[in-house]
Image: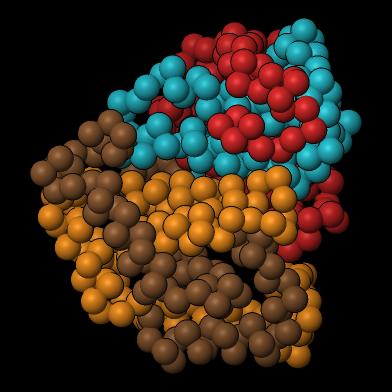
Chain colours: A orange, B brown, C red, D cyan
Amino acid sequence: MKKETIERIRKFTIDRDWDQFHSPENLAKSIVIEAAELLECFQWDNEKYDVEHLKEELADVMVYCQNLLDKLGLDADEIVNAKMDQNEAKYPVEKAKGSAKKYDEL
Amino acid sequence: MKKETIERIRKFTIDRDWDQFHSPENLAKSIVIEAAELLECFQWDNEKYDVEHLKEELADVMVYCQNLLDKLGLDADEIVNAKMDQNEAKYPVEKAKGSAKKYDEL
Amino acid sequence: MKKETIERIRKFTIDRDWDQFHSPENLAKSIVIEAAELLECFQWDNEKYDVEHLKEELADVMVYCQNLLDKLGLDADEIVNAKMDQNEAKYPVEKAKGSAKKYDEL
Amino acid sequence: MKKETIERIRKFTIDRDWDQFHSPENLAKSIVIEAAELLECFQWDNEKYDVEHLKEELADVMVYCQNLLDKLGLDADEIVNAKMDQNEAKYPVEKAKGSAKKYDEL
């Protein structure tokens, strides 16, 4: 996300004095609650879905992720790159290519 | 996330030929599965948690969100700003300030 | 579940002095964490799954549901029948038959 | 649950011709979606919650669990007792008493 978008998310929280509700645990609950609403787009059909609804629910997940990053003073690029280091080590191309198996079954 | 980080996520998928597994529904399931692993950091304690573990699980959620954006050709800033428009309308500052109530109970 | 099975679940908690961790909120988190592990059986494939693993994860969900019933002194038949009353009213046979639509779209 | 309650759940599905939507995967998604609605009772407050709402959401989780048992021809007591065998072996009383640690950290 661009800096302006991130700033808009932060301002939204500050303006409403909602930081008091943003404990890391409450934000983790909120991420899973919104993720389940995203999944609900596919509850009875794997293929047809309402893309406008999906966009709203995915945005909700992403906003709460940003709230959690902010709450803990984390940098998105730093934590994602650290995890990608791990993923690349756990799933070497020559073993993982074309396979949906977990790393411990490769 | 920076363009390089996003490109790294994309290359990881392409190199492993994993786009075939990235149906929107599979990615929605993956987001909720990782969100629940993030929540597991707080399963029995609301306050103490392993921040290194939390960073990994939050990164997993964010990577799958990026995968879903990519799969559907969506732009993070666009969908988040559209949702923030809605949130700002549903939670006007004067009504929502300091309250954790849902918009339909304000 | 039979009375003996329910008693076994209760004894397991008592013997380990785990009631102290079973706040309603911790049990709600545990139910969603285990439900996501159940979903993981289908993460990359909608049709093939490991039935032995599925049985373990479904049992985990059911055990935590029983823990929550016990914590709050609720009766499974009572709450399920009350909800079925609602479901039957929201989804009348003549409208809902053969349709996966939500009640507010029927 | 009593036999009559289980029969009521089954009849509800049959009367609406909904078995066609009850693939194991769809039911697994439904369990996690309802579990997240249960968690929503505690989204911003760990201690205060609407018990009537909680009862409805817990009942929803339990109904979908029964649907999944039925779909796969599983017996609740059998799978729960098999899991309790595992739990008792993984969490021996003398090690686990009073501790919220995972079995691999005991």
- Quadrant where the N terminus of chain A lies? bottom left
**Residue B97 versus residue D25: which sits nearer the camera?**
B97
Residue C44 appearing in the image = yes
Please tell me in which quadrant of the rendered image residue D7 appears: top right
Left of D94 or right of it: where is D46? left
Left of D97 or right of it: where is A60? left
Picture residue at 67% right of the left edge, 62% below the top = B26
Picture residue at 34% right of the left edge, 52% below the top = A27
Please tell me in which quadrant of the rendered image residue D81 appears: top right
**Is residue D71 positioned above or below A16 on the image?**
above
Left of B49 or right of it: where is A92? right
Residue A98, image x and y in percent? 78, 81
- Quadrant where the C terminus of chain A lies? bottom right
**Residue D106 versus residue B69: which sits nearer the camera?**
B69
Please tell me in which quadrant of the rendered image residue A68 appears: bottom left
**Residue C32 versus residue D22: which sits nearer the camera?**
D22
**Is residue B52 positioned above or below D38 on the image?**
below
Residue C49, image x and y in percent? 82, 53
Q: How many marks?
A: 0
Residue A5, image x and y in percent? 28, 72
Picture residue at 74% right of the left edge, 63% below the top = C44
**Residue D8 versus residue B46: which sits nearer the camera?**
D8
Residue D85 appearing in the image = no
Picture residue at 69% right of the left edge, 67% below the top = B23
Residue A41, image x and y in percent? 59, 51
